[in-house]
Every structure is written in structure tokens, then in C-alpha cells.
Image (tube, helix red, strand yellow):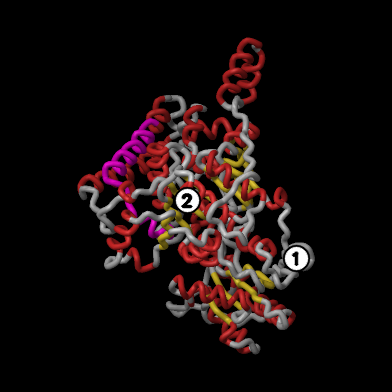
């Protein structure tokens, strides 16, 4: 059918000319602006620090190019770009007060970086106790009345500052209206109504969720337990967000709800930031928001649309792409492919939104707000890996793992046949058990033997080998594992076992730490300092706690990934962290092992 439509469109010269002109007027009419920041001066900046050319250009774009996404690779210096751009905009009178939002474990580090670049800056940093019941009103009062250049807080604290009831009510009602329009469109054509039945049900379910939220908001009078002041009343006219891919799961209204690669269920934090970005865009124009991330696309094409909706919605409106389906029909395509079944025992056909169309026009629109800098473009000096690439150590399954995998395969088949109640067993449960089983059989079968060639034991062997090789330089190693962390319920803990085994083999317990040992920001900063100095030489952590932004690279000799995170971006962040030390000119160990 698509091929027949193309033939019909191009056969008639007049028709072809008409739609080519229409397409060019809508999508092929943007000429990208080049930003040269080499001439800038920075009053108040520390004279001991000089920004690199790509950083100067990024600051120039953020100052005069409207809302900006700093899509720079890990290690490119996004922190200084955000700080310099914010301070310059404040100095020029373009903004009054910025709200800076970063991951919880990076609040203190961002404040330190800010004062390192601008020693005289007036910033307010939210501590962990500032948003508890006894201190919240005092902090909000300081935030509202103080003449600060920036207020730095964590994602969680940012979400505790609500929008006003009126704004939330109008926002939810607009989304409900959009949902209803999608339902009406799918239901209107009787010829395709039966094919769209599942999509209509999904949209009805999401609409019902929003209607319930709206009713609760109206019944409760907009009351919140966190603060009497709303985001609008705090005086913020600028928003700066680090690691912005944290908000990638925004609300998408689409008839492609059953297509892989299209995330239609929004995260609450993404709804919250969408409201706040819309408020800033409506009241101050699309010029006071800066997002920064090393992975602008983590695992879905919809993230390109979500970021554009946050930062430059006018581009979508001018091109007639108000809805996601409009955007997807122009720049993407659903493809059907044979994929391996989750149980690993065969193939199945899967529809996936995974093909781009009209890429030049899409990227030209995207680059209107995205400043893209990859490692190849910047030619960043990254330490060479031993062997030139990550080492993959293969652990062969033992008899217990092989037998249990067969059980998981049988359960998977039963689920797909519809013979099992999802509340009793489901694919998410099977996937989690398979990850635990692959890590170590003891994670699933508690009385299983300690298999010498298990993945965990092979990791311990490698850690000991590198520990001895880098003894003179006090080389530091980071072990990442997101599952089987705690043993509170009596189950096997990978962290506890690795620590006990390393101590048994001769490493001092004082040289080993876990990310969970540091409960406060002060303790985290102390732990990072000990890792940078080599006082602590082994750290066990999850991707969420130390995968991004943790400045521990001074003596970093090796990164070990025991399990595979859900998103490719998580692997990139943990692995690319090895590139930061040389950029900051503090690298002491030149060779980096995976």
C-alpha cells in the first residue's frame, strides 16, 4: 500500500510539485546557526581555569540561541558549560534566578564545581534535611527571598516543589483533551476500528488515569504536604538540568501503544518537569532552559520528540507536528522483524518503531536546540584500554543454572500461551530471575554450592590480579552490580560475598567500600576523596548511585560490570568515565582496564 501511494504521488508532475513545495516549506526551511564563542570574556570567572573552544561555543549558544540541550559526550566539561552559561545570563540581565537540578549524589559536587569556576558566586545548595518537615519552610523562604545566582537541588527535591493547583488542573485537562482527540480519530473510521481496538483501550485507560488525578486534585483543593509555596512563586525564571535523560519517559499520546520503542506510560517526574518547562516557555519565551546529557537518546526514538517538546515546542507547532503520531509519521517507521524469544528457544515477529525517515530534516530541526559534540568530534584524549577494547570474561553455566534455565523457558512458554495468571507469574519476574541466575546460582537456589568458575568468582580473581599489578600506584577498581545487593531477607548478597572473599585473600577491609556506606552528601564527598587518593582501592556500586558523575577517576585502574544494565546509556556512562581524568589533567594511571 505504501509503494502504491508513492507511485500515485510521484506520477503526476503537478501533484508532485505541490507536495514537494509543501514539504520544503514545513521541514526543509531551517538554516542552522553557527555559534562562535571565542571572543567572550567572563568577569568573575577564576583566572586559573580556561574553557575549551567547544565549551565557549556552547556557552554562546546557551546565552543567545534559546533553550539548549548540551548533548556532549561524557568528559566534555558540561558542568562548566552550565555554570558559565548561567552566570553570564545572570550578569547580562537575561535571567534573575536559576533552579539547577542534578542527581542526588551530585548536589555537593555541582556546588563545588560552581564555586571553583566562579569563587564569588552566590548559590544556595539544598542539603538532604532542607526538605524534611522541620526545615522545608525555612529553605523555601530563603529560596524565595534571597538574591541567589542559582539554587542547586536534587531531582527528588525538585519534584517536591509543586505547580499551582490551577496550572496542574489546566495541564491535565489539556492532556485529557488530547487523549480524547486520539480516541475519536481511531474510532471514527469504521474500516479500521477493529484493528485499533487495543490502541483505543490503552488510550481510554490512560485517559481514565488522568481523569482520576484531576478529580483528586479538585476534591483536595490542590493541597500538598510539602509546601504552601508553588514553583511559580519562588522567583525562578531559568531551569538547568544535568543528566537530563532522567526525564526521557515523558507523556506520549499515540495509537502505537502496542509497538515496541514507543513509551506511552509517563513517569510522574517527567510529567512534573513538562509542566515546569511549559510554564517557563509560556512566561519567558523558549530561551531560559538548559538541559545537559551525555546520552540524549538512551533506548528509544521517542526521546528525540520528548526533548523537543521540553525545549522547543514551537518548532513542532510551526511544522504541524503537535502530536507524537504526526511526528512519527514524518520521521519514523514501524518495522517488523524476527527477534529471539525472551526464553531463548526460538524466534517471533515483533513490531518495533526503529527506522528513521527524512533524517536530514529531522536533524536540522533537532540541532536548532541541541548542541551535539561526540568524542570523535572533540578528539578527547581517552586512556588506552589493555588490548584496545573491553575484555569479556565468559563464565560457563553449571548444572544448577542449566537446569533452572529450562524451568524458566517452560514458564515463559506457559505465559505466552495465556495459561498463567499475570499476578502469579509474568515475564518481568522471569527476566529478573534469569539475571540473578546468570550472576550466581546462589542468588536463586540458596543451598547451591559455591561454583569456583561462577561470574562472581571470576570477577574476584580479576580484581585480585589488578590489585596486585597496580599496588605501587594504589590503583582503584570499581565493581558495578545492580542486583543481589542486600541480604536483608536472608538471600545471597553479591556485595557481602565479594567483600568477604577479597578480605580473605589479603585485601584490608579498610580499602574496600560500597556506595551505600555513604548515606549523606558529606559522607559521599569523603568517600570520593578517599577513592581519588587511593586510600580506598575497591568500591562496589550500582549504576544509579555511581554510574554517572562520580568523580573517582584520579587513580582508576579498572571497571568491572557484573551484570548488564537495562539501558545502553548506563554502560556508556560507566565505561566513558575513564575518559574524564586526562581531560582534567589529573590522571596518574595511564593504562585503563575494563
- In the image, the segment drawn in magenta is 154-181
Q: Which residue is at the front of the view, 223 or 204?
A: 223
Q: Residue at x 70, y 51 (%)?
A: 378
Judging depth in this view, the residue of 78 and 464 nearest the camera is 78
At 74% across and 69% down in the image, what residue appears? 590
Disc 1 is placed on an element classified as: loop
Q: Residue at x 62, y 59 (%)?
A: 49
| Residue 209 image-quadrant placement | top left
332 with respect to 226 (left or right): right
User: Alpha-carbon distance for marks 1 and 2?
Assistant: 34 Å
Residue at numbered disc 2: 240
Q: Dot 2 surroundings within 10 Å: few (below 14), some, or many (20 or more)?
A: many
Q: Residue 31: image x %, image y %? A: 62, 30
Q: Residues within 10 Å of mark 1 (few under 14, many from 20)?
A: some
Please state the horizontal and vertical placement of residue 469, each as a whole percent of the image. Answer: 74, 80
Residue furthest right as drawn: 387
- Quickly name the residue at label 1: 385
Q: Earlier in the sequence, mark 1 or mark 2?
A: 2
> Which of 370 and 487 lies nearest the eye of the viewer?
370
List x then y, in percent, for residue 241: 48, 52
Instruction: Assess whether residue 179 is covered by the magenta stretch.
Output: yes
Residue 299 shows up from this direction = yes
Quadrant of image for the C terminus: bottom right
Q: Is residue 352 above or below residue 407?
A: above
The image quadrant of residue 512 is bottom right
Image quarter in which the N terminus is found? top right
Relative to 45, does residue 368 appear above or below in the rendering? above
Residue 5 quadrant: top right
Instruction: Name the dominant secondary structure of the magenta segment.
Output: helix
Amino acid at each position: 500500500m505504501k509503494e502504491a501511494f508513492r507511485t500515485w504521488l510521484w506520477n503526476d508532475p503537478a501533484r508532485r510539485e505541490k507536495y514537494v513545495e509543501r514539504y520544503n516549506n514545513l521541514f526543509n526551511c531551517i538554516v542552522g546557526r553557527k555559534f562562535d564563542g571565542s571572543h567572550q570574556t567572563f568577569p568573575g570567572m577564576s583566572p586559573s581555569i580556561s574553557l575549551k573552544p567547544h565549551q565557549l561555543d556552547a556557552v554562546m549558544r546557551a546565552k543567545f540561541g534559546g533553550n539548549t540541550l548540551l548533548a556532549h559526550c561524557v568528559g566534555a566539561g558540561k558542568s562548566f558549560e552550565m555554570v558559565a552559561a548561567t552566570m553570564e545570563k545572570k550578569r547580562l540581565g537575561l535571567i534573575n534566578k536559576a533552579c539547577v537540578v542534578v542527581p542526588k549524589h551530585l548536589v555537593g559536587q555541582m556546588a563545588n564545581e560552581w564555586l571553583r569556576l566562579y569563587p564569588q558566586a552566590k548559590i544556595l545548595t539544598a542539603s538532604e534535611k532542607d526538605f524534611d518537615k522541620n526545615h522545608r519552610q525555612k529553605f523555601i523562604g530563603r529560596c524565595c527571598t534571597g538574591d541567589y545566582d542559582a539554587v542547586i537541588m536534587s531531582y527528588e527535591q525538585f519534584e517536591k516543589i509543586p505547580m499551582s493547583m490551577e496550572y496542574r488542573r489546566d495541564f491535565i485537562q489539556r492532556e485529557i483533551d488530547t487523549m480524547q482527540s486520539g480516541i475519536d480519530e481511531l474510532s471514527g473510521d469504521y474500516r479500521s476500528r477493529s484493528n485499533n481496538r487495543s490502541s483505543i483501550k490503552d488510550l481510554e485507560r490512560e485517559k481514565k488515569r488522568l481523569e482520576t488525578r484531576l478529580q483528586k486534585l479538585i476534591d483536595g483543593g490542590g493541597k500538598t504536604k510539602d509546601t504552601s509555596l508553588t514553583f511559580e512563586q519562588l522567583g525562578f525564571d531559568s531551569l538547568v538540568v544535568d543528566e537530563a535523560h532522567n526525564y526521557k519517559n515523558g507523556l506520549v499520546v499515540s495509537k502505537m501503544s502496542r509497538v515496541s520503542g514507543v513509551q506511552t506510560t509517563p513517569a510522574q517526574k517527567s510529567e512534573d518537569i513538562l509542566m515546569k518547562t511549559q510554564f517557563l516557555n509560556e512566561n519567558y519565551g523558549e530561551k531560559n532552559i538548559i538541559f545537559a546529557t551525555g546520552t540524549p537518546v538512551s533506548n528509544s526514538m521517542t526521546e528525540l520528540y520528548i526533548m523537543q517538546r521540553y525545549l522547543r515546542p514551537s518548532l513542532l507547532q510551526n511544522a504541524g507536528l503537535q502530536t507524537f503520531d504526526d511526528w512519527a509519521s514524518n520521521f519514523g517507521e514501524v518495522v517488523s522483524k524476527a527477534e529471539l524469544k525472551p526464553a531463548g528457544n526460538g524466534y517471533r515477529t515483533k513490531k518495533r518503531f526503529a527506522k528513521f525517515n527524512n533524517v536530514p530534516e529531522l536533524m536540522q530541526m533537532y540541532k536548532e536546540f541541541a548542541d551535539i559534540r561526540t568524542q570523535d568530534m572533540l578528539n578527547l584524549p581517552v586512556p588506552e584500554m589493555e588490548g584496545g577494547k573491553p575484555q569479556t570474561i565468559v563464565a560457563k553455566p553449571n548444572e544448577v543454572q542449566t537446569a533452572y534455565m529450562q524451568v524458566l523457558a517452560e514458564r515463559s512458554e506457559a505465559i505466552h500461551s495465556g495459561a498463567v495468571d499475570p499476578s502469579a507469574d509474568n515475564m518481568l519476574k522471569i527476566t529478573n530471575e534469569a539475571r540473578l541466575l546468570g550472576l550466581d546460582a546462589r542468588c536463586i537456589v540458596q543451598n547451591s554450592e559455591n561454583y569456583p568458575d561462577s561470574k562472581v568468582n571470576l570477577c574476584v580473581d580479576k580484581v585480585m590480579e589488578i590489585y596486585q599489578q597496580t599496588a605501587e600506584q594504589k590503583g582503584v577498581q570499581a565493581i558495578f552490580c545492580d542486583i543481589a545487593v542486600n541480604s536483608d531477607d536472608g538471600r545471597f548478597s553479591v556485595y557481602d560475598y565479594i567483600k568477604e572473599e577479597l578480605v580473605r585473600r589479603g585485601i584490608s577491609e579498610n580499602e574496600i567500600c560500597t556506595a551505600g556506606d555513604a548515606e549523606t552528601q558529606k559522607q559521599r564527598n569523603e568517600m570520593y576523596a578517599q577513592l581519588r587518593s587511593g586510600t580506598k582501592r575497591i568500591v562496589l556500586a550500582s549504576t544509579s548511585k555511581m554510574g554517572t558523575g562520580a568523580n573517582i577517576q584520579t587513580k582508576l585502574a579498572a571497571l568491572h560490570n557484573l551484570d548488564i544494565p537495562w539501558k545502553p546509556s548506563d554502560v556508556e556512562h560507566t565505561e566513558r568515565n575513564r575518559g574524564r581524568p586526562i581531560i582534567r589533567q589529573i590522571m596518574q594511571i595511564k593504562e585503563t582496564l575494563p
